[in-house]
Image: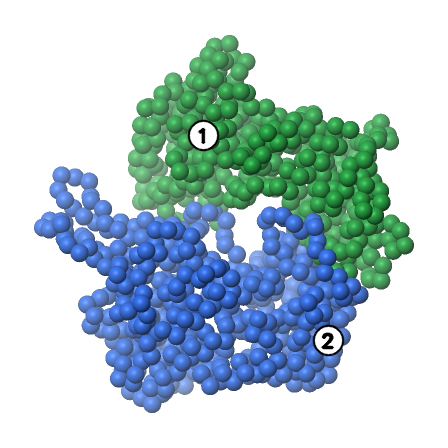
Chain colours: A green, B blue
């Protein structure tokens, strides 16, 4: 049951000072206990330190609201690092806040704390010196990079050195291709030491599950080795164009890496359409065609992936989400059986829902690493 | 048909979130019953909608009630909407799920119906890709279990369709027998047809998240196991209380009674999980070996001990949740002179190295003050009271409580000094609650257990030896009570915490029931 979230803050932003911040965090808990809901005992819960990097006041404000939701399922100490590197003046400010959840009447009030640190100009280099002492001892550290392209400045090395898990969102990359390549290079450098999560990859996890399930039956499994064509179709004019473009690339990378396809070449057949990729499989050549589709009232939820096995016994497997944005209809057409379809729930999850799932998992995703590696080769061609 | 294809699916490698079983079909015997409608079908729908079931997953309902595929499908779709309180926007999922539902009218004794069932399953293999994998679910009254099992065997449905490449499993609902003799007989009949590793005896209590968390709590944390023994634990209490009465199950309850309904299965299963030795690995065989070992170590009660260490009682009229409720004897389909117990309290000992001389107090009942299932582990008092005088009365033993329902979680009671110049000591509670700590609601027990069975994980299901060991323990108690008839039956007011005799049982040992 979703409950009320109460934000309890102390004072105005002030010059960041470690002693003050620790004191303010203690005062915060006293304040929460006295708090706006008398009679509720306060339970403080913490499973990790969540560092969040943003680059504007607006983004920090937006993230504060998201953190309130995230802490409902993943109680943590959240530290928002806001860097305005373009600012003329230089300085570090910080303030603390508690997010308290009142699940149902009579239940306990569970609170998580948030520290926001605003760095301007050159003072950004001092961010690690304020952030690192505030991390909760003995618990894992997650860094959520919520600022477009993932390009941490050199002074972030101290933070990355203690971070176990970095979360990015390739839906925020621009241009997506080049930055996916950069991400692959970065991952190669830190591989094995830092676990990388891409929220955009998590958005297509249900699609990957559906595609995989389609070939579980021994009758259908042989078609995987005989695939000759993959068609990916998404909306041309939606605000989620970058999201879907990156998803198309990652799905291709996943199929290729899992099915052992070797990348051959790419070509642009039409100016207005994305490049077509060609791979070599054990059975021959596989074409991956991506099509931009004009959709009325585009909202970035329509997505189709179709797998075809041509030849003597042709088969087709399609997965389509239309504008309702919640239902994926799957259809398998194989010789000797009537077409079989089903509808399952694959909603466009919001950022908080995906992040919550990823924070719970917190494990290395070598599937993503393999897929990204293939994508980097595709982009480089 | 690809009978020999055993190629793995490379696209399933590393998919992180869901465990998806192999394609399969499930046959529910007793498909027109309450359990199918209220629990099984909603659980299967939820799993299907959330992509946790394989593509092509199909259900065949079998029952005596005449129905067609369409009418049964319509009824099950209605059940899904009703019990999951779905909005109209879920219609597409319900319709999609419904396409995989079929029905065969069967009086369970007609061999022709099993031939029809076999044909239907073969057709599903061809048309929906169910790959020869079958799960049979016996949700009928227990009297039909033997006949169904025998017919499944005779029709060749008990063996995997493709040896080494497909599976056949059977889930059997409780009650598994009504005494040791009938349980043994049922086990004999079942294992004549199915191998033990095909048989999944379900106890939905074991699918609850906290029950599984109990194992994680004990074996994934280094700090508890060293204290989990007679040296540090004073006693353990298990309470499984219900505020409901027998509802419309009067005739069943008259035959069963509280011990058969709750103690023989749920309560003893919980007890075995609390007290078992660490298994070598977390797999079905190791875990169930340890559970059986500890059940075997429970000291059987002699006739005299039964009189001393057990209490049986029946509720009389009272108030529950602000409503007046009738006495058990006034419930529909209950004899006005019934001596069936609706409450039982027991004191047991486990004769092994770990638990020697530690008493285990079990109590369970209908129409008690509230619905709660809790395991309370009371530790020994500190050996020497340092804080004598003012405030020392506040020193209570540490209690570790595992709440199985309704608020799944774990709490630890310990002592703390009240702020101030004087030494005032009070017990405080440190709590972990699933709902508060992790937000997302845990899956229902049936979702967990159905999925586990399809995945071939029998860890949370009962094995034949555990079932028989449980009956061995309760049979003498039931025999003794039957001999005594009305003599020795206590009464308690509905809405109370049970009879005074149960209080006396624990107070004789200088202890009290833990307030749950």
Q: Nearer the viewer, residue B149 or B284?
A: B284
**Residue A201 x %, y %:** 64, 39
A338 versus A225 height, above or below = below
Image-based side of A40 in relation to B135, left or right: left
Q: Residue furthest bottom?
A: B483
**Residue shown at the point (60%, 41%) measured from the top left:** A365
Q: Nearer the viewer, residue B412 or B50?
A: B412
> According to the image, label 2 marks what residue?
B118
**Residue A142 x %, y %:** 50, 35
Is the residue marked by circle 2 packed among few (<14), some (14-19), or many (20+) residues within 10 Å?
some
Is the residue marked by circle 1 packed among few (<14), some (14-19), or many (20+) residues within 10 Å?
many
Chain containing the residue with disc 2? B
Quarter of the picture holding the N terminus of chain B? bottom right
**Residue A168 x %, y %:** 59, 32
Q: Residue furthest left?
A: B389
A252 versus A85 height, above or below = below
Q: Secondary structure at mark 2?
A: helix
**Residue shown at the point (65%, 47%) measured from the top left:** A206
Q: Secondary structure at mark 1?
A: strand
Quadrant hosting residue A274: top right
> According to the image, label 1 marks what residue?
A79
**Residue shown at the point (26%, 55%) measured from the top left:** B398
Estimate the spatial distance between the alpha carbons at disc 1 and disc 2, rounded to whole Å.
61 Å
Quadrant hosting residue B135: bottom right
Regarding residue B73, the answer to whether it shows in the image is no
Q: Residue furthest top?
A: A88
- CB contact under 8 Å: marks 1 and 2: no
């Amino acid at each position: 049951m979703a409950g009320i979230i109460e934000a309890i803050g102390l004072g105005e932003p002030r010059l960041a000072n470690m002693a003050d911040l620790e004191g303010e965090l203690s005062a915060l808990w006293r304040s929460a206990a006295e708090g706006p809901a008398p009679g509720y005992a306060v339970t403080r819960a913490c499973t990790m330190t969540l560092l969040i990097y943003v680059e504007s006041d607006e983004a920090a404000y937006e993230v504060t609201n998201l953190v309130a939701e995230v802490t409902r399922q993943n109680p943590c100490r959240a530290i928002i690092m806001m860097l305005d590197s373009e600012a003329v003046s230089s300085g570090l400010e910080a303030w603390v806040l508690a997010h308290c959840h009142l699940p149902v009447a009579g239940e306990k009030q569970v609170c998580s704390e948030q520290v926001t640190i605003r760095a301007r100009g050159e003072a950004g280099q001092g961010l690690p010196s304020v952030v690192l002492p505030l991390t909760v001892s003995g618990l894992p550290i997650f860094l959520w990079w919520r600022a477009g392209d993932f390009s941490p400045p050199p002074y972030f090395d101290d933070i990355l050195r203690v971070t176990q898990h970095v979360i990015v969102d390739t839906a925020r990359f621009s241009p997506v291709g080049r930055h996916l390549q950069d991400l692959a290079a970065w991952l190669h450098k830190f591989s094995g030491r830092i676990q990388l999560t891409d929220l955009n990859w998590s958005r297509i996890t249900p699609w990957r599950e559906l595609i995989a399930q389609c070939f579980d039956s021994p009758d259908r499994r042989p078609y995987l080795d005989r695939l000759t064509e993959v068609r990916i179709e998404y909306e041309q004019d939606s605000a989620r164009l970058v999201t879907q473009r990156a998803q198309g690339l990652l799905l291709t990378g996943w199929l290729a890496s899992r099915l052992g396809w070797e990348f051959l070449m790419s070509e642009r057949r039409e100016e207005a359409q994305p490049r077509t990729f060609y791979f070599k499989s054990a059975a021959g050549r596989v074409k991956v065609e991506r099509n931009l589709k004009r959709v009325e009232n585009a909202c970035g939820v329509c997505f189709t992936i179709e797998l075809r096995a041509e030849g003597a016994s042709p088969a087709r497997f399609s997965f389509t989400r239309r504008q309702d944005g919640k239902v994926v209809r799957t259809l398998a057409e194989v010789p000797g059986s009537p077409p079989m379809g089903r509808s399952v729930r694959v909603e466009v999850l919001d950022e908080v829902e995906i992040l919550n799932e990823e924070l719970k998992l917190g494990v290395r995703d070598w599937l993503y690493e393999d897929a990204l590696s293939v994508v980097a080769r595709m982009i480089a061609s | 048909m690809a009978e020999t294809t055993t190629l793995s699916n490379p696209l399933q490698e590393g998919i992180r979130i869901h465990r998806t079983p192999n394609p399969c079909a499930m046959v529910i015997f007793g498909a027109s019953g309450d359990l199918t409608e209220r629990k099984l079908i909603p659980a299967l729908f939820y799993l299907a909608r959330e992509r946790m079931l394989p593509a092509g997953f199909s259900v065949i309902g079998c029952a005596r009630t005449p129905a067609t595929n369409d009418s049964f499908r319509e009824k099950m779709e209605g059940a899904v909407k009703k019990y999951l309180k779905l909005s109209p926007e879920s219609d597409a999922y319900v319709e999609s799920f419904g396409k995989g539902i079929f029905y065969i009218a069967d009086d369970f004794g007609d061999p022709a119906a099993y031939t029809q069932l076999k044909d239907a399953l073969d057709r599903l293999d061809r048309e929906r890709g169910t790959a020869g994998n079958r799960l049979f679910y016996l949700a009928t009254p227990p009297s039909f279990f033997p006949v169904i099992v025998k017919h499944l065997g005779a029709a060749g449905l008990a063996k995997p369709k493709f040896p080494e490449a497909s599976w056949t499993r059977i889930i059997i609902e409780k009650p598994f027998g009504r005494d040791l003799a009938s349980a043994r007989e049922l086990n004999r009949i079942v294992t004549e047809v199915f191998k033990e590793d095909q048989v999944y005896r379900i106890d939905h209590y074991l699918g609850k998240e906290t029950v599984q968390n109990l194992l994680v709590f004990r074996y994934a944390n280094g700090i508890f196991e060293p204290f989990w023994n007679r040296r540090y634990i004073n006693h353990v209490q298990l309470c499984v209380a219900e505020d409901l009465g027998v509802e419309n199950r009067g005739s069943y309850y008259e035959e069963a009674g509280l011990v058969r309904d709750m103690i023989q299965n749920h309560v003893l299963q919980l007890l075995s999980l609390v007290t078992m030795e660490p298994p070598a690995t977390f797999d079905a065989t190791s875990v169930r070996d340890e559970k059986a070992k500890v059940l075997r170590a429970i000291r059987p009660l002699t006739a005299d001990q039964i009189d001393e260490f057990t209490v049986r009682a029946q509720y009389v009229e009272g108030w529950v949740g602000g409503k007046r409720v009738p006495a058990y004897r006034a419930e529909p389909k209950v004899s006005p002179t019934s001596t069936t117990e609706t409450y039982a309290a027991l004191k047991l000992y486990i004769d092994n190295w770990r638990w020697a001389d530690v008493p285990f107090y079990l109590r369970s009942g209908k129409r008690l003050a509230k619905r709660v299932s809790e395991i309370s582990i009371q530790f020994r008092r500190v050996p020497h009271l340092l804080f004598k005088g003012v405030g020392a009365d506040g020193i209570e033993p540490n209690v570790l409580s595992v709440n199985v329902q309704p608020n799944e979680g774990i709490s630890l009671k310990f002592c703390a000094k009240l702020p101030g110049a004087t030494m005032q000591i009070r017990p405080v509670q440190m709590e972990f609650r699933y709902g508060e700590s992790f937000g997302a609601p845990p899956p229902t027990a049936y979702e967990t257990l159905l999925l586990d069975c399809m995945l071939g994980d029998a860890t949370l299901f009962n094995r034949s030896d555990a079932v028989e060991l449980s009956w061995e323990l309760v049979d003498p108690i039931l025999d003794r009570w039957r001999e005594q008839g009305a003599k020795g039956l206590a009464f308690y007011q509905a809405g109370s915490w049970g009879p005074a005799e149960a209080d006396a049982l624990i107070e004789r040992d200088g202890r009290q029931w833990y307030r749950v």
